[in-house]
Each structure stands twice: as structure tokens, then as C-alpha cells.
Amino acid sequence: MELAYEYTRKRKDFGRPCNFSDWPARVTVDIPPDPSLASNFILRNPVDSSVQHVCEMALHEVNTERVEVASRGVNHVEGGWPKDINPQEPEQTARFRKKLEKDENYVNTILHLGTLMEHYVKQNNTVDIYEEYFEEGDVVELEDQPPYAKTINILRDPNVVKRTATRLSWNPNASEKLAVAYSNLQFQHSTKDMSFDSYIWDLGNPNEPELALSPSSPLVSLEYNPKDSNILLGGCYNGQMAYWDIRKGELPVEVSTVEFSHRDPVYGALWLQSKTGTDCFSASTDGQVLWWDIRKLSQPTEKVVLDISGRGSLKDSLGAVALEFEPTLPTKFMVGTEQGIVLACNRKAKTPQEKISGTFSGHIGPIYALTRNPFNPKIFLTVGGWAARIWSEEIKESAIMCTKNHPSYLMDGCWSTMKPAVFFTTRSDGTLDVWDFLFKQKDPSLSLKVCNEPLDSLRLQDSGCILACGSRMGTVTLLQISPGLCTLQKNEKNLANNMFERETRREKVLEARYRERRLKERAQSEGVGTEAEEFRQTPEEVFVDTRNRYFMIIEDELQRRMQETTVLYEVRQDEEGGKEEGGKEEGGKEEDEKEEDEKEEDVKEEAGKQEAGKQEAGKQEDGKEEDGKEKDGEENAAKEL
């Protein structure tokens, strides 16, 4: 590719033209000195001068033109027929085949090619070129390197009015295609010129979306069909359900009716494991979970009301924000609610009480993410409030593990598809946290500032190496994870399972002790009953007691600090005294020897005194015995008298 540049400038801008030629030296002007002007000059001393011997450089910028890439398809049809034969007409093709099969060259050619094909078929049957010899071998240990994540691409909302990227979904067959649902979830912030479209992006061409999905209301949730990647399921802001077949264009194939749809935005929409691949279900903040068949979206096939009281009342139901379904457990599903409670539900239960089989409460605020561990389905992750928690289905009172409380709100999270103890969380300050509980549990293994706005959505590719983060302004950032965070190491599954089992057993023990304690307290409260009522305090007495306790705590703290200061002062004095004594040690060695001699003499004298004392003590004991005998004789004589 040749580049040509042309620069134009007017002749008058170049200045006076230069004409160089050889001339001998000559004096043009001679100004004689004027002695009268010498008094006006002051001699400058010292004189500072600077010289810079650097070439002057010019900075230029060149912006190359962007190459526009367009996707085009090619249709391959049956070829090799003569021009006078139409391959679409079976009669002409059959007549031509019969004519060709009678030719001698055709028979010889087929016999020759048959022997070659037989040889290659036998060779393929003997050696399997796709065989993996080291499939179950030891995984190569990676080098010890710090975890990292680098940005590989950014997808921006093409509309002028930016919207939130509420849900992300990777194509199950083509890993370079990503479906993004755009919607403005802020109350009364939608404008008339705001677009309703959501897009399917091709990572090979990030400048513009590959296909636009045009619903009747903005999409809040969007999901690819795992069996057919041409079909997508979407949940709208007005509560309707719709599905698209990208082979038929940007408009939905069918949309549910408003009367039988949700009343609030559909925050969760997932496909079910079925033979037809057309079953799905959805959840919304109106407190309902509805099952659908996309072949007939006019009304749902089944409904569950999220009322934990068991009455099935829609007024008392809990609003659903997150939805989870595991294909290995076809009748069970889990729902994360606005109230911070996780509901474990059973679809095949008969009564409303049995449909909600259990509850897990531990979050302050809505649960924005709820996912099961891909390696251990009994373990699931919840993200809400300021922390993420890991739960076990066997323990319902408390989580078995949790992260620290962050200064900003957590918005979404997901498990790693390659490592059993690694999960990802996003925050409202635009930070992505990568946790590896086998390596570190108090702090994340990697914290990356992705953008300045909140990261509302998160989705990991099936390969586990590329992570997509959607922001409040509609920007989707694609990050490539370091190999240490997406490569399964030797014996890592067993270590993670042992860790989860250990924490589950610990929580069971704590739960049993807590129940025993509650039973004892209840028994004591029932036994003491009336006495407890007599000793109830008024609010004023409670206030006085708390104030006195507060001042007592302050006094104890002051005394403790005074003791610490005195101990430090004494330690410093001892150190200073030790230094002074160390300087006098050499001069006082002779005195120490004299003192040792005197001590030995004193010890000898004390030993002699102790022996003399023992002798006197023996004499005194003998005298006491004689006195005792005399007293006994006097008593006997007195008795006889």
C-alpha cells in the first residue's frame, strides 16, 4: 500500500528567497567607537550563558481510517452437472446417472478409487488420530505468578441515551457471540427517545452489533437456548415474556399476553431441561414464578406464589430478583428475593406449603445473584448487601463461608466454570473481585478497577478464560483471566470438596449447640416465669444501667492505659540502669571477687549456727519430755489423793 502526501503553501509565506554564491570577504558597514558612550555602560560580572545542543523535534499524529467489516454468507449448491441438465429436476439427473453408469471409463474409475478408499478406511480404523492419550494424566503445574486480568475488548451501547446492561448471555456453540439485554431500571428515568433494542455482539466486529432484538418493552433478562443457539428467551420490563429466532429477524416470534404475564419486571428467565427444548420459567418481583412453553406463550402452564406462610397469597409473597435452576435436579429450583431470603422450592409438590421446602436468610437487602457450584451442586453462592456468602443445602440457619463486608454494594457474582473454589463478584464502585477460597479467604486474590460506574451484570464464558462485565452506562468490558485462575490443578476438586464438607460439619456442630442453648434458656424462662416479670426494668432504669456500664467501661480503659504507661516507664528506666551498670562492670570485677569471698565466709558461719541451733533444739525437746513426765506424775498423785 503506497502513501502519498502533498503539501501546498503560498509563495509569500516563504519569506525572502535565498541566493547563495561565492564572494570574497568585504566590509559592508564600519561604525567607529564613540568614547562618550562608555560612561553609559556597566560591566556585567559574572556573565551566565547557556547553550543547548539538542536537535529540535516535531510531534506529529496520524489517525488511520477504520476498516469497515461486513458479515456475508455464501450458499453452496450441488454442482458438477452439465449445463443442459437442471439439478433441481430429478428426472433429468436420474437419466444422466443411468447414461454415465453404462460407460466403461466410469466402471474402471470406480474400481480404481474403490481400492484406494478401502486402504484409507482400514487405516482410519486402525489408528485413531483424535485419541487423547493423556486425558486423565497429571495436570502440569503452572508457574507461580500473581493473578491478573487484562481488557481485550469493550462493547458500547450504540444509542445516544445510555442504558444499563442488565443481563449477559454467551452463545453455547459460538464462544465469540454475546447477547446483551439493555434496560433502564431506575424509577421514572426513562425518556421518550430511549431505545428498546437489545443486541447480539460478535467479538470479531466490536464496532457495531451483529443483530438487534426489538421487543415491545425493554429487556431485563435474556438467555440463549442451550439446545438451539438460534433461539433466545427474554423477559421484559412490563412483565411480558418473548422469544426470538435470529434466523427470522429482529422481531420476536411470539410474545405472552399482558393478562397472563407478570406484573413487574422479569428479573429471571431460564430454560428448563426437557426433550423438546421449549420449556422455560420466569420470576419477577410480583412474587410469582411462572412456567412457559414457547410453542404456546398465550398463558403459563404452571404457577407458584412465593408466600412463605403457605397460604398462597399474592399480597404476602416475596419479590423474586434472582433465579437458579440445576439440570441435574429437574424438580427443584431456588429463588433469591428482595428481602434477602433464599427460597428452596419444589415444582412437583402438591400443596403450597410443600412447594417452598426451605428458606435461607442471612443477607441485608436484595439478593442480586444466586448460582450453584458447577462441581458440587449442594453448594451455592449468594451475592447481596455488602458481602457474598456460600451456603450448603444441609445448613439453613447460616452460611458456611462468607467474604468480608466491602465499603461498596455488591451487584452480581458467579462461580468459575474451571476451578471449584473460585468465584467472581462485582461492586457498585466499578471494581471486579476474584476470590479463591483455597488460596485466601480474608481478601480477594485479585481486585481490578474496571470502570467508574457500577457493574450491574457479570457472566463467565464456558471456557472459564473470558469474563464479561456490564456497567450502568451500557458498556460491556471483556476481560481475559490469567491461566492460574482458569486452569484446574492437581487434586483441586478433592481439596475444595473437603473444605466445604469441613465447614458444613462445623456449622452443624454450632447449630446443635445453639439449639441446646435456646432450649435451656426457654426452660429457665418458663421455670422462673413469675420472677422474671417482677424483675422487669422500666426504660428509665435500663437507661441508667447502660449509662453506668458505659462509664465503668471508660474507667477500666483509662486504668488499663495508665498501667501500660507505668509499665513502659519502668521498662525504660530498667534499660537505662542496665546501660549504666554495664559501664561499671569492668571497674568492679575485683570488688565482686571480694564480695564472693565474704559471702562464702558468711555461708560457713550460718551453717555452724544452724548446727548449734539444732543441738539446742534437741536439748529443749528432751527437757520438754522430762517436764511432761513430771506433770503426769503430779496428776496421778493428785488423783490418788
Image (tube, grey):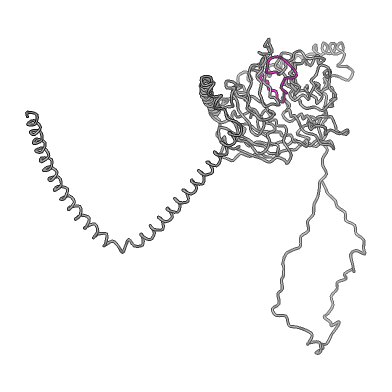
Q: Position of residue 193 (x, y in %)?
A: 88, 34
Most common secondary structure along the magenta stretch: loop
Observer-nearest of 615 and 220: 615
Quadrant, the C terminus: top left
- Camera-nearest residue between 410 and 555: 555
Q: Is residue 508 visible?
A: no
Residue 548 in the magenta stretch? The answer is no
Quarter of the picture holding the N terminus: top right
**Looking at the image, residue 590 lies above or below residue 124:** below
The part of the chain drawn in magenta is 307-326
The one nearer the camera, 451 or 408, is: 408
Kindly indicate the quadrant of the structure image that contains residue 206: top right
Residue at 8% in and 31% down: 638
Q: Position of residue 606 (x, y in %)?
A: 18, 51
* Quadrant in which residue 207 is drawn: top right
Instruction: Indicate left or right for 126 with 75 as reference.
Output: left
Tell me if 318 is positioned left or right of 193 in this view.
left
Residue lying farthest bottom? 35
Asked if 309 appears above or below 197 in the picture, the reply is above
Q: Is residue 388 visible?
A: yes
Residue 361: which quarter of the image? top right
Q: Nearer the viewer, residue 482 or 297?
A: 297
Q: Position of residue 391 (x, y in %)?
A: 60, 25
